[in-house]
Image (cartoon, rainbow, N blue to C red):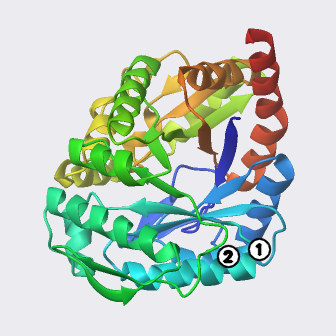
Amino acid sequence: MTEFHWFLPTSGDGHHVGAATVTAGAARHPRAATLPYLTQVARAAESAGFGAVLTPVGSGCPDPWIVCSAVAARTERLRMLVAFRAGFALPTLLAQQAEAFQLISGGRLALNCVTGGDSVEQRAYGDFLAHDERYARTAEYLEVLRRSFAGAPFDYEGQHYRVEAGGLTKPIDPVPPIYFGGASPVAETVAARLADTYLLWGEPPAAVAARIARMRELASSYGRTLRLGIRLHVIARPTADEAWAEADRLLAGMSPERRAAAQARFRRMDSVGQARMTALHNGSDERLEVSPNLWAGIGLVREGAGTALVGSYDEVAERITEYADLGLDEFILSGWPHLEEAYRVGEEVLPRVGAHATVSA
């Protein structure tokens, strides 16, 4: 069964990609990420049929655990896909946090493990490991975390973590699924061994199909089966012309200064996934439609997921169906502003995805 999730804009929201203005290095969003506003977005996602909301994690975001705990108390069914940085808190402690979250939310926690792809940001947190070392630590982290969830005392000794008679006092119920992304070979190995759902960023279908095949084979070599998901933005309107006009409006709102600063930051990052996103446009807006209805303009100013599906409601639904047919199980979507677009995508696009899937079946 295909699942659809939404994004919770915990650093702010508005009618532009990211911040509308940047003053003295500080982003200013027209809609502050107050608890009442984030609750509105979450309730809209819940009402529109999304299963979960994903939160970001990083230096420009408030702590996801605290925010999601508050939002969970103000929603009923919506799951919280809480992002965390592996290595920034002990995995045994994170297991306790997950146990508490399951208790207070009625079992609505999922976890998105982030290793980190910006060495400058990592060092600002106090983490000086190189790229592959970070992923080696992440592997140990997830091993300890999973053993902690089992609720039986265990010992563990690795390069980065050592535990004696650790773990929760009883099994966590339900066990939160672990989402994980990363495009480098070491990241793919960690995902194949230890994740439940492997997340990709939006690339053309041929590239996505190749990665799906590779991840299925790699997971199978460890005797495992992965769910596969993709992170995409959506610009959908009643007609294609209206949708592309909205994309043009978003592009016009990306100042040369913001674009230059973003591209400079992306170049310094050691994230393979970010490099793949940047390669789709190479900092230029000349050929941003990189495959039918897949627009790379978001990635001119936004790190991470940098592509959007652009088109009429029917066209976007067709593209989502095509991605699902490649073997994707989950879609994490977003749009600006996240409040209005949650209703738009949930009410206009998702029902059409179901209709297309029924016809194609």
Q: Could you tell whether 175 is left or right of 285 in the image? A: right
Residue at 77% x, 33% y is 350
Q: Which residue is mark 1?
A: 106
In the image, residue 181 above or below residue 129: above
Q: Give percent across and percent down for residue 133.
A: 15, 62
Residue at 86% x, 53% y is 47
In the image, residue 232 above or below residue 110: above
Q: Secondary structure at mark 1?
A: loop
Local crowd at mark 1 within 10 Å, few (<14), some, or many (≥20)?
A: some
For the question of whether residue 34 can be seen, the reply is no
Residue at 73% x, 82% y is 104
* Quarter occupied by the N terminus: top right
Q: CA distance from mark 2 to mark 1?
A: 6 Å
For the question of whether residue 228 can be seen, the reply is yes
Q: Could you tell whether 21 is left or right of 319 in the image? A: left
Residue at 35% x, 50% y is 193
Q: Are marks 2 and 1 in contact (CB under 8 Å)?
A: yes
Q: Nearer the viewer, residue 157 or 299?
A: 157
Task: Identify residue type, mark 2.
Answer: Gln
Q: Nearer the viewer, residue 110 or 68?
A: 110
Q: Give percent across and percent down for residue 306.
A: 44, 41
Residue at far top of view: 360
Image mark for residue 128:
none
Q: Give percent across and percent down for residue 168.
A: 51, 84
Quadrant position of residue 176: bottom right
Q: Which residue is mark 2?
A: 102
Q: Secondary structure at mark 2?
A: helix
* Quarter occupied by the C terminus: top right
Local crowd at mark 2 within 10 Å, few (<14), some, or many (≥20)?
A: many
In the image, residue 80 above or below residue 325: below
Task: Identify residue type, mark 1.
Answer: Gly
